[in-house]
Amino acid sequence: MTHRRLARQGSRAAGGRLLLVMMFGVAACGAAVAHAQGQRIRSGVELVSLNVTVTDGSNKYVTDLTEQDFDVYEDGAKQNLTFFSRTQQPIALALLLDTSASMDERMGIAQEAAIGFAKQLHKEDQAEVIDFDSQVRILQAFTNDAAALEKAIRQTTPNGSTSLYNALYIALKDLKKVKAETTSDIRRQAIVLLSDGDDTSSLIEFEQVLDLAKRSETVIYSIGLRQGEIARREFKEAEFVLKQLSSETGGRAYFPTDARELQKIYQSIWDELSSQYALAYSSGNPKRDGAWRRVQVRIARPGLTARTKLGYYGPTGS
């Protein structure tokens, strides 16, 4: 896959300094587990935390399962759960909006859909609004003020190219520095990303972004907005990117062909975030080789499907 570089657009180099933290996207039930069990919060990965979505054959969310309904496997070996909860932690959300020039005719509809999503936040939840084109801007830092979020979303204006990879890379790096000072600060975290095309102006390549996303446990919900058969043919690279980012991190990718579908999609994402289970286990693998470990969750009840992140990198060092 060919990836374009920002280097050929020297005049945009200064824009890189504006690539601040664009999202807050870690599925942080591990720390919540520590809180629930009275344990000290650990920064290592010995305690593997999972946010799990379960659906039936009609793709409806199933929320009445018990711990006995879940079986977790790591590299094919069954693991023993140390934590299970159906009680949802507060959520920290990054609403990420593509404001490149190609979004011009659909910006108004996209704004209204994002505003409707933000208005569903509970008082314990927080959200951040970020837009990106040739640059990345944090229009509103984390807040639970619905009016402030709406104001920020309405400030978005289409212009320029698309520097998605740059923004993701910088954000994932900065996210590693974010630590909850107390257990009361812990929130489940997710990114909701809206874009209408390929990255066209990033220095960072997709493979680097994907690797960081997998290491960070970031949950990414992607909405790839495309229109018509021409757009469908030209959207192949973007579709691959968004699908893989969402699949690897336990999120979901949507590809509407009409901007009027956005409100329904945002509602679906909110419903999913409100319907997840929090699980955790201590890995039975004693190796500290930093290798990728594949994770699978199976449901005992027939006809149900579980979705979570595809795996994680094991610990390193002694």
Image (tube, rainbow, N blue to C red):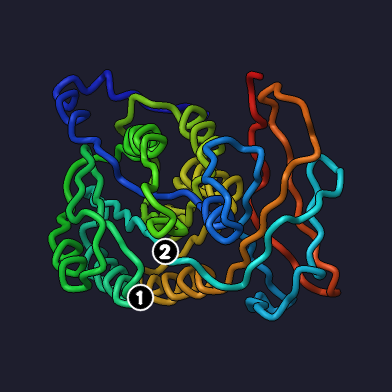
Q: Are marks 2 and 1 in contact (CB under 8 Å)?
A: yes
- Give the secondary structure at mark 2: strand
Q: Position of residue 281 (x, y in %)?
A: 71, 50
- Give the secondary structure at mark 1: loop
Asked which quadrant contains residue 215, the reply is top right
The residue wearing badge 2 is: 91
Q: Closer to the camera, 204 or 18?
A: 18
Amino acid, disc 2: Ile
Left/right placement of residue 203 relative to residue 90 reads: left
Q: Position of residue 171 (x, y in %)?
A: 35, 38
Q: Residues within 10 Å of mark 1 (few under 14, many from 20)?
A: few
Amino acid, disc 1: His
- Residue positioned 39% across, 69% down in the render: 258
Q: Earlier in the sequence, mark 2 or mark 1?
A: 2
Above-or-below relation of 206 to 94? above
Left/right placement of residue 54 relative to residue 266 reads: right
Q: Position of residue 84 (x, y in %)?
A: 68, 64
Q: How far apart are the two marked residues, 2 and 1, measured between alpha carbons? A: 9 Å
Left/right placement of residue 189 relative to residue 171 reads: right
Q: Closer to the camera, 2 or 317?
A: 317
Residue 251 seen in the figure: no
- Residue positioned 26% across, 57% down in the render: 142
Asked which quadrant contains residue 70, the reply is bottom right
Above-or-below relation of 64 to 94? below
Name the disc covering residue 103, or none.
none
- Residue positioned 44% across, 65% down in the render: 257
Q: Position of residue 316 (x, y in %)?
A: 64, 23
Asked which quadrant contains residue 317, the reply is top right
The residue wearing badge 1 is: 122
Total count of labels: 2
Q: Residues within 10 Å of mark 2 (few under 14, many from 20)?
A: many
- Residue positioned 54% across, 31% down in the render: 211
